[in-house]
Amino acid sequence: MSKLTGMLAVLVALSALALSATPAPGDATWDGEVNDLWSVTTGGSDNFGNWDADPTAGGTLWFPNSSWTSTVDLDTSGWGITGLRPRGNGTLTIPAGGTLKTTHEIGMGNPGHPTVRVTGGALVSSVVWRFGLLELSGGSWTGGRCYAGPEIHVIGSGSSISPTRFACGEPRNQVRFTLDAAGVSPFAPTSGDPFDDIQSHGIPLVVDGIENYVGSFGDIVPLFTFGPGVTDPHIMNIFPSSMFNYDDTLATLTVDDTGAWLEIIPEPATMILLAGGLPLLLRRRRRRR
């Protein structure tokens, strides 16, 4: 499939989704009447206490346009979930032991600005898009594409992030990486054509927490990595250098057609010490002669 054909197919799918603004027969809506756990049942597998209908019936799962919390604390791979509609200002968390799998898309927001937080479990979805925040601090995100999607925040180095493609080029978005002592988990798109440049504008690429990194000067910290021999210049359109946001006294940030990465550099105080120590070292060498 060509990139243009793929883009058109996605746009058609998203247009159809936009028309689906209310639950349909076979869908279920979260009400959280018992607590915030997906594993809660009352009276059998076909009567889930936190839903108004059976969430395993193969439909779309909806969330209210309000504040709510919901925790995917079990494996939903066998539920046949078609799509997910987090709305309002709620937070959906996927901890260790939880797996959220949808056969179609996760359409965040519209209305609202919800958060989907992967802290140790697995997110498997064909498309993640619309408004909201996708936060990744552990676990994995696989098998999906990010189209015109949410703000993304990668926290620390404990995640595996390998969606098929990336095309989150909406002006409301940003991609943010926060380093821990070991660095940060990179995006590793699995497609040989990893980026779609479906927007004419760029989005901010934000990197913080560089001071948390424990390593050596000159270390490379990957942010986006492609497969062997894969290049894609569209990444430079989505993340132009004019929209970088990071502390350039601690690292240099590079984006080219092979990916994106940080290179750790000495902090200014260390640079001064190194600069002051060099003449002393040269004098000592001269004396030994």
Image (cartoon, grey):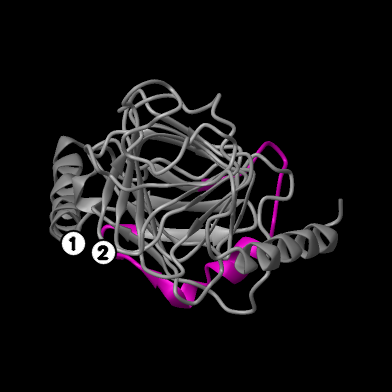
The answer to whether residue 40 is above or below residue 116 is above
Q: Is residue 258 left or right of residue 133?
A: right
Residue 209 image point, x, y percent:
23, 53
Residue 186 drawn in magenta: no
Question: On the picture, is 173 further left or further right than 215?
Answer: right
Which residues make up the magenta segment? 224-251
On screen, residue 17 above or below 38: below
Percent position of residue 74, x then y = 38, 25
Q: Tell me the quarter of the image containing the C terminus.
A: top left
Residue visible at 55% across and 65% down in the picture: 21
Considering depth in this image, is 223 or 75 the residue closer to the camera? 75
Q: Extreme front residue here?
A: 43
What is the C-alpha distance between the residues marked 1 and 2?
Answer: 7 Å
Residue type indicated by callout 2: Thr
The residue that appears at 74% across and 44% down in the rendered structure is: 192
Q: Which residue is mark 1?
A: 268
Q: Amino acid at mark 1?
A: Pro
User: Which residue is identified by label 2?
Assistant: 249
> In the picture shown, does residue 184 fall above or below 112?
above
Q: Nearer the viewer, mark 1 or mark 2?
A: 2
Look at the numbered disc 2 and give the secondary structure of its residue. loop
* C-beta proximity under 8 Å, tags 1 and 2: yes
Which one is earlier in the sequence, the residue at label 1 or at label 2?
Answer: 2
